[in-house]
Image (cartoon, helix red, strand yellow):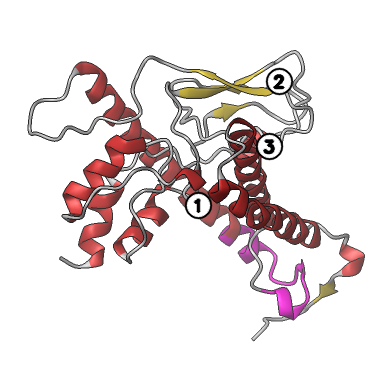
Amino acid sequence: MTDAQLIPLIDAQLPQTQCGQCGHPGCAPYAEAIAAGEAINHCVPGGQATIDALARLLDKPSLPLDPAYGVTPEHRLVAFIREDECIGCTKCIQACPVDAIVGAAKRMHTVIVDECTGCDLCVAPCPVDCIDMVAGPDIPMTWHRPDAAPLSANEAAAKARADKARARFEAHQAREAKRVAAKAASRPNAVIAAPKSAGAPDTSALMIAAALARSQLKKAQKQLAAQADNATLKARLPALEKAVIDAEAALAKAQAPASKRVRTTGDIS
């Protein structure tokens, strides 16, 4: 079986939270990494059931969840915005990988609970810290069975929710790519970064990357507070801290005032 055939099968086992705790910007990129040989035990929200399902699919020995990546929550979580404290900055909307937050600039935002995957990427960028992760619907994160028995109603609901989250993530990614392409096409002589940075991602993508880095660091710090003797987690902390510094530096550079950039009048080769 080729990687192109295998990747969708791997992705179909993942919970589609698009949380990035595995170190990849979404479930599909992690599926690609697994197909390329990465370990199958990095999916925190999927937990042991997902790892076991991947092991069966790939005919590999199962492994326990790698504790360096986190601890699987006991219940499904969703984001909750304390609306009376929301300032309408839209940063959480930009960070959400499945468009589960609605609102407008300087207007109250709210989470669509039925669409929220619990990724918590909206928490870190909130400048007023008005977003909490709370218990969500009583639906499991996984639906995998070691046998061919029919899924229970709750398991079927979990699979349907994951399939819908995948579709929303793909739609979000496609829309963002189209928006960036349209913006570039409409501004052929736009103010852009100096040639050495011409390949830098769009600012919105950098904002999401920075939010992801902060979120992963925050999770690791919380886990370390509860597992002070976890040597693996301690060893991983410096890399997470550096990832935050690098991501925020890249974002700051992309958001630098126009006076610090170079105006071009033609294509860059």
The amino acid on which the numbered mark 2 sits, given as a three-letter code, is Met
Secondary structure beneath label 1? loop
The amino acid on which the numbered mark 3 sits, given as a three-letter code, is Ala
Q: Nearer the viewer, mark 2 or mark 1?
A: 1
The amino acid on which the numbered mark 1 sits, given as a three-letter code, is Pro
Determine crowd level at label 3: few under 14, some 14-19, many 20+ residues with C-alpha closer than 10 A.
many
Seen at 18% across and 19% down, the residue is 152
Q: Please give the label number shown on residue 103.
A: none
| Mark sitting earlier along the chain (2/1) | 1
> Could you say where residue 116 lies in the image, as x and y percent from the top left?
48, 27
> Could you say where residue 5 lies in the image, as x and y percent from the top left?
20, 61
The span from disc 1 to disc 3 (Cα, nearest Å) is 16 Å
* Rendered image quadrant of residue 147: top left
| Mark sitting earlier along the chain (1/3) | 1
Q: Which residues are magenta?
A: 181-198
Q: Name the residue beneath numbered marker 2.
A: 108
Q: How many marks?
A: 3
Q: Residue furthest bottom?
A: 269
Q: Name the residue beneath numbered marker 3.
A: 124
> Could you say where residue 172 lies in the image, as x and y percent from the top left?
49, 44
- Find out whether the residues at labels 3 and 2 contact each other: C-beta distance under 8 Å: no
Q: Quadrant of the C terminus?
A: bottom right
**Left or right: where does residue 145 sit relative to residue 8?**
left
**Left or right: where does residue 79 sit relative to residue 214?**
left
Can residue 78 be seen here? The reply is yes
Q: Name the residue beneath numbered marker 1.
A: 25
Seen at 38% across and 43% down, the residue is 65
